[in-house]
Image (cartoon, rainbow, N blue to C red):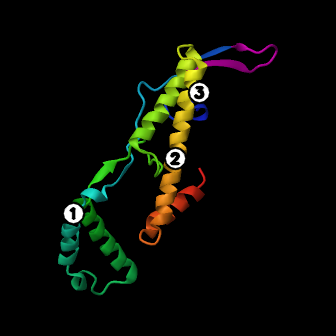
Amino acid sequence: MLDLILTNKEGLVGDIKLKGSLGCSDDKMVEFRILRAARRVRSKLTTLDFRRADFGLFRDLLGRVRWDKALEGRGAQDSWLIFKGHFHQVRERCIPTKRKSSKKTKRPAWMNKELLGKVKQKKEAYRGWKQGQVTWEEHRETVRAARDQVRKAKALTEISLAREVKDNKKSFYRYVSDKRRTR
């Protein structure tokens, strides 16, 4: 019971000992340890990998099913369940899955490899300044350079989006919706 109250997994509470009572009370003290997991469990969240999907095979397999015979004399609910079953079987066969990784999170549209390196340099300069390995002036110069490049990259991205809005509306509205989304 103590396990379920104090932790989110079973088996993490251990070394439980009953100690003496508190003063004149008839309640007993309980001493315990919350054990850490032996290793971190990684999330195994998977998503469909549409880049490697074989849509030609997908279309062909769904086209081979004789729907008039498969759905004959069935109601809407039964027909839907049959269709859904066929669809999921074909999807499993034609669209592979991939594991989602938190390392490859979506970066902003303006962030490129060079800019990512500058931001990392800025963080390292701050860490070095805190440890006394880098002077304040060097740290400030690195921060200013990184900030200027980020500003320029954002401005260039917004200018190119505005220039190409008539030809590429989807990217423009995706950028706007990313700006509106709260985290």
Residue 162 part of the magenta-drawn span: no
48 or 11: which is nearer to us? 48
Chief SS of the magenta region: strand
169 or 94: which is nearer to us? 169
How far is disc 1 from disc 3 in space, using C-alphas?
52 Å
Residue labelled with disc 1: 54
Is residue 117 rendered to the left or right of residue 58? Answer: right
Residue labelled with disc 2: 152
Foreground: disc 2 or disc 1 = 2
Residue labelled with disc 3: 140
Residue 29 part of the magenta-drawn span: yes
Q: Position of residue 163 (x, y in %)?
A: 47, 65
How far is disc 2 from disc 1 in space, using C-alphas?
40 Å
Please tell me whether mark 2 sits on a helix, a strand or a loop.
Answer: helix
Q: What is the three-letter code of the residue carrying label 1?
A: Asp
Is residue 101 rendered to the left or right of residue 132? Answer: left
Q: Quadrant of the N terminus?
A: top right
Q: Position of residue 134 (x, y in %)?
A: 54, 17
Callout 2 touching callout 1 (CB < 8 Å) = no
Magenta stretch? 20-34
Does residue 109 sit above or below 91 in this rendering?
Answer: above
Q: Earlier in the sequence, mark 1 or mark 3?
A: 1
For disc 3, the neighbor class at 10 Å (few under 14, some 14 to 19, many from 20) is: some
